[in-house]
Image (cartoon, rainbow, N blue to C red):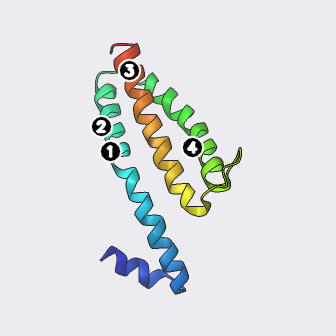
Amino acid sequence: EILGLLVSSCHTDDICQLAGEFARYGMLQIWPMAAYCALRQWFQAQGVVLPATVVSVISVGVNMGFNSLLVDGALGFKGLGFIGSPLATFSSLCFQLISFSLYTIGYKKL
């Protein structure tokens, strides 16, 4: 049903094909985002808020860097074009989950 909605909103077949490809790569983001949100909520319920704030702010910069690298390329890497964007967001969300977990559970032992 969602695909039908997407197809009906497309202006050309090319746009529909690209949007579908982007969405397939974008689905990778669900698991790290869900895990981070659950872990963050658990710590927030205990009154531990600052680590999530710090990690979220840092993750914005990391996402900008990953987008630049994966979309446009750098240091001999050609870049992936627009598919690099959902992969960059996925990578940033993994960074966010891992860094928050390491900081709160590993380093601070909260």
Labelled disc at residue 38: 2
For label 3, the SS is helix
**Structural distance between the alpha carbons of marks 2 and 4:** 21 Å
Density class for disc 2 (Cα within 10 Å; few <14, some 14-19, many ≥20) is few
- The residue lying at 34 percent from left, 74 percent from top is 2
Which percent across, then down, holds residue 77?
A: 66, 50
**Structural distance between the alpha carbons of marks 4 and 1:** 17 Å
Q: Is residue 75 left or right of residue 63?
A: right
Q: Which residue is mark 4?
A: 63
Residue 81 vs 44, above or below: the answer is: below
Q: Considering depth in this image, is 8 or 63 the residue closer to the camera?
A: 63
Q: How many discs appear?
A: 4
Of the 4 image quadrants, the one containing the N terminus is bottom left
Q: Which residue is mark 3?
A: 104
Q: Which is more N-terminal, label 4 or label 2?
A: 2
Labelled disc at residue 34: 1
**Structural distance between the alpha carbons of marks 3 and 2:** 14 Å
Which is closer to the viewer, label 2 or label 4? 4
Residue 69 vs 95, above or below: the answer is: below
- The residue lying at 45 percent from left, 35 percent from top is 96
Q: Which is more N-terminal, label 4 or label 3?
A: 4
**Structural distance between the alpha carbons of marks 1 and 2:** 6 Å
**Structural distance between the alpha carbons of marks 1 and 3:** 17 Å
Residue 24 vs 65, above or below: the answer is: below
Density class for disc 3 (Cα within 10 Å; few <14, some 14-19, many ≥20) is some
Labelled disc at residue 90: none
For label 1, the SS is helix
Q: Which is more N-terminal, label 2 or label 3?
A: 2
- The residue lying at 37 percent from left, 26 percent from top is 101
